[in-house]
Amino acid sequence: MSVSPAPLVIAVGGSGRHARVALEAADLAGLPVRGVLWDALPDGEPFFGSHRVLGGLDRLRDRSFLQGCRIHLGTGDRAVRRSMAETVRANGGQLGTIIHPAGLISPSAVIGAGAFVAAGAIVGVGAVLAEACLVNTGASIDHDGRLDAGVCVGPGARLAGTVLCEADVFVGLNACILQGLRIGRGAVVGAGAVVTRDVPAGQTVVGCPARPFMR
């Protein structure tokens, strides 16, 4: 006998705009959603559609609350996503994954806990998305690519085959990363950049071809 998954609870960070995107994707995918956690509205207030606020983000430390649900990370801020994920795991909770039904996911791809894949996104053959990754609208991760924990890929970005993005990398809107390159931990690839060589950890690159950003 199959067991129904625990309902999702969306933990809202920041303005709540990305959380609305995640909620709509969950609804379209037919996933059960209990409600949202947000500090900006009182308990019981409507948030989006029929979904209401269940409490504040302090509930992420409430072990009894976490036992009956899976937490999805309703923010596009990669640092906040990682912090939320760590809090949930430290308190015995589970992360919930949302894949928009208009996303195209290879059957051989692996999608980690707490990840979000938006409408029009493509995740290719053998690709791996680790915990708390975010692949935004229309972005693509080609064959055998790997996103380590907390990586955020912006709308329309293109990652060619076998690209490795280490933990907490941010890839901006419409950026392109050529095949087989390695983007070091915490690096930032600016919007529209074309990356033609490896990027060291913590570095920000911009332009075509991409070069280190000098402040």
Image: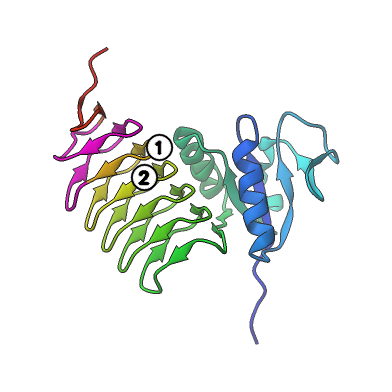
Give residue 60's position: percent from left, percent from top: 63, 42
Task: Tell me the magenta residue range.
Answer: 178-201
Label 2 sits on what residue type? Ala
Give residue 9's position: percent from left, percent from top: 68, 51
Task: Determine which of the numbered discs, if any, sits on residue 173 in the image.
Answer: 1
Task: Determine which of the numbered discs, if any, sits on residue 4 in the image.
Answer: none
Membership of 181 in magenta stretch:
yes
Q: Is residue 23 left or right of residue 134?
A: right
Q: How many callouts does the rendering have?
A: 2
Give residue 191's position: percent from left, percent from top: 36, 32
Note whether residue 61 is visible: no
Quick one: SS at disc 1? loop
**Dominant secondary structure (helix, strand or loop) of the stretch shown in magenta:** loop
Q: Return the residue found at the far top.
A: 215
Q: Is residue 42 above or below residue 74?
A: above
Give residue 195's position: percent from left, percent from top: 21, 38
- Disc 2 target residue: 157
Label 1 sits on what residue type? Leu
Residue 32 image-quadrant placement: bottom right
Q: Is residue 1 above or below residue 30?
A: below
Residue placed at 22% from the left, 33% from the top? 201
Note whether residue 188 is visible: yes
Q: Is residue 125 above or below residue 146?
A: below
The residue lying toward the viewer, choosing from 110 and 70, is 110
Residue placed at 65% from the left, 35% from the top? 16
**Circles 2 and 1: CB atoms closer than 8 Å:** yes
Locate the C terminus by quadrant. Answer: top left
The residue lying toward the viewer, choosing from 94 and 97, is 97
Q: Is residue 125 above or below residue 212?
A: below
Quick one: SS at disc 2? loop
Q: Return the residue found at the far right.
A: 44
Q: Is residue 201 left or right of residue 124?
A: left
